[in-house]
Image: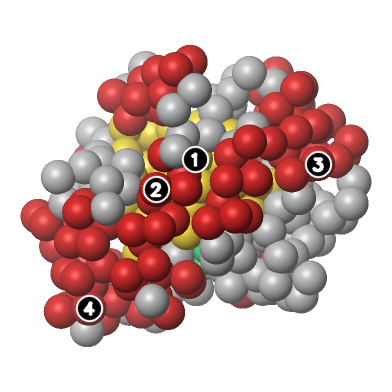
Amino acid sequence: MGPVLQQLEDAKVRGRKFLAVLIDPDFGQAETRLEKTVQNACMAKADLLFVGGSLLTSASFDHCVKRVKEIADRPVVLFPGSPAQMSKHADAVLFLSLISGRNPELLIGHHVTAAPTIKAMGIEAIPTGYMLVDGGRPTTVSYVSQTLPLPHDKPGIAAATAIAGELLGLRTIYMDTGSGAQRTVSPAMISAVRKSVGLPIIIGGGIRDSVTASALCEAGADVLVIGTAFEEDPEHIFAMSEAVHR
Ligand code: 1GP
């Protein structure tokens, strides 16, 4: 097991929750803004920095990851929207299989394309079952992946999907309503998945306030991923970090 997954598992055993700050390289094109976000994340004791996006137009992905790694004194993890989003400067990559969908490219196709690069770069790959959940409106990820999200009010389907992921040997489950979603994954769905699998659970999409963050952690989330709320207000990270770590 690689060091980042080990950290996730150790934290889960100790009941310690993680905050991951999502850096969208497109959004962070203004370098001073990117630096500020990363510095704030470190000062606020965020645990992980995720870099990626489902639709990237930035040609400088590798430069962005390198810059984040230079500034951050904590693990930098790729959250790739395509096999092109790889960088040797990262500590790990979420090796995502979109198990809520039935798009073969996102279940195995892109993995075949990316695998030799990941191996050659020598970065840690974390096999992750990615489940897209309906967040109230179509998001970039639902459009780009051309998959139907899981219905928001069907925790049973989410639990069955997560169990399948665990039986297939995946090591984490990432439930996401997509960046900028109107609503988060529901606590009921997180709780159903928590009762069904022993894997670390990552939750993202639409998390904007501390009360919601606390509720999602209490329901069983191990890692919360937040991007949009910090793009809108970089100082917001301090209150959110406190809520997650409380
Ligand atoms: C999206 O989970 C991430 O994949 C983060 O979502 O930008 O809404 O925080 P937000």
At 21% from the left edge and 52% from the top edge, which residue is drawn? 42
Mark 1 Cα shell of 10 Å, populated few (<14), some (14-19), many (≥20): many
First reached walking from the N terminus: tag 4 or tag 1: 4
Q: Is mark 2 within 8 Å of ligand 1?
A: no
Mark 2 Cα shell of 10 Å, populated few (<14), some (14-19), many (≥20): some
Mark 4 Cα shell of 10 Å, populated few (<14), some (14-19), many (≥20): some
Q: Residue furthest left?
A: 70
* Residue type indicated by callout 3: Ala
At 75% from the left edge and 33% from the top edge, which residue is drawn? 191
Q: Residue furthest bottom?
A: 30
Observer-nearest residue: 206 or 25?
206
Q: Is residue 6 left or right of residue 220?
A: left
* Residue at which label 2 appears: 242
* Residue at which label 4 appears: 33
**Mark 4 or 2: the one toward you:** 2
First reached walking from the N terminus: tag 4 or tag 2: 4
First reached walking from the N terminus: tag 3 or tag 4: 4
Q: Is residue 82 above or below residue 122?
A: below
Observer-nearest residue: 207 or 105?
207
State the CA–CA distance, disc 3 to disc 4. Answer: 36 Å
First reached walking from the N terminus: tag 1 or tag 2: 1
* Residue type indicated by callout 1: Val
**Mark 1 or 2: the one toward you:** 2
State the CA–CA distance, disc 3 to disc 2. Answer: 23 Å
First reached walking from the N terminus: tag 3 or tag 2: 3
